Image (cartoon, rainbow, N blue to C red):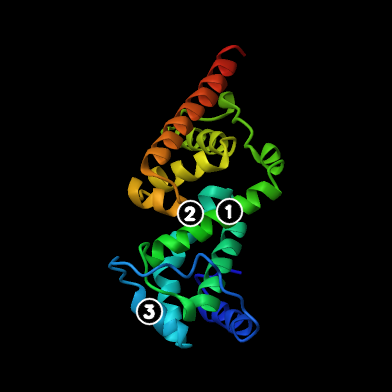
Amino acid sequence: MVLTARPSHLLAQASILRNGAATQDPQMANKPGTVNDPDAPLVRRVGKGDTRAATKLVQRHLPKITALARHMLGDASEAEDVAQEVFLKVWQNAGKWEPGRARFETWIHRVAINLCYDRLRRRREVYLDTIPDREDEDSQPADQNIIDLQTKRRIEAAMKQLPDRQRAALTLCHLREISNIDAASIMEISVEALESLLARGRRGLRRQLFAEAKMLLEK
């Protein structure tokens, strides 16, 4: 299902679940705080069954959530599934939402990250089979675009071998360009812990890329 093309279809599925015996997501009920949340009015309207408000939330946040999941999972189809799960949770729990110390956008990023963790744990061994084969450089023209593509693929393959939390930190801060403070809030850790994950993730990437470069040179 391509959610960007059919938000109404997503809302139809969500409505079915929302009218059932939905249970409260504990992450959804934040304690009252003073955070200025531009999404709060829309979330309150969604809680009252306003499908137009739900569509606006989907249009506002779906591309970011899908991109985050795609970077984490390396699979566009699974990324769309994760995005759908996130917005189904929103629809089911919007009536219980209380503006708190974290913004709504932070919460949905947190939910998406946790859903990605679950999927990575269930299919970790698949990554070993999906690492792209190295291009046969002798058969490729000396074109910068091809070199850039090869570099991108190697970095993506190296990212897949990192521990989940290091990958999440690098994805949020470097690929999604989210601030360290917001990324730490999404991951529910301190800024210092986030910076430690970033440092270890960068070191892990350098080690893997250096090992590959050494192997290529020894051919």
Task: Please name the residue shown 42% across and 72% down the image.
Answer: 59
Answer yes or no: do the residues labelled 2 and 1 have beta carbons within 8 Å?
yes
Task: Please name the residue shown 61% across and 69% down the image.
Answer: 1
Amino acid identity at mark 3: Leu
Amino acid identity at mark 2: Leu
- Label 2 SS: helix
Whether residue 6 is visible, yes or no, is no
* Residue 50 found in image quarter: bottom left
- Identify the residue under disc 2: 68
- Identify the residue under disc 3: 42
- Crowding at mark 1 (Cα within 10 Å: few <14, some 14-19, many 20+): many
Task: Please name the residue shown 50% across and 73% down the image.
Answer: 90
Residue 160 vs residue 116, the one in the foreground: 116
- Crowding at mark 2 (Cα within 10 Å: few <14, some 14-19, many 20+): many
Amino acid identity at mark 1: Cys
Task: Please name the residue shown 45% across and 75% down the image.
Answer: 97
Which is more N-terminal, label 1 or label 2?
A: 2
Quarter of the picture containing the C terminus is: top right
Estimate the spatial distance between the alpha carbons at disc 2 and disc 1, rounded to whole Å.
Answer: 9 Å
Estimate the spatial distance between the alpha carbons at disc 2 and disc 3, rounded to whole Å.
Answer: 22 Å
- Identify the residue under disc 1: 116
Residue 213 vs residue 22, the one in the foreground: 22
Q: Is 33 displayed left or right of 52 in the figure? A: left
Which is more N-terminal, label 1 or label 3?
A: 3
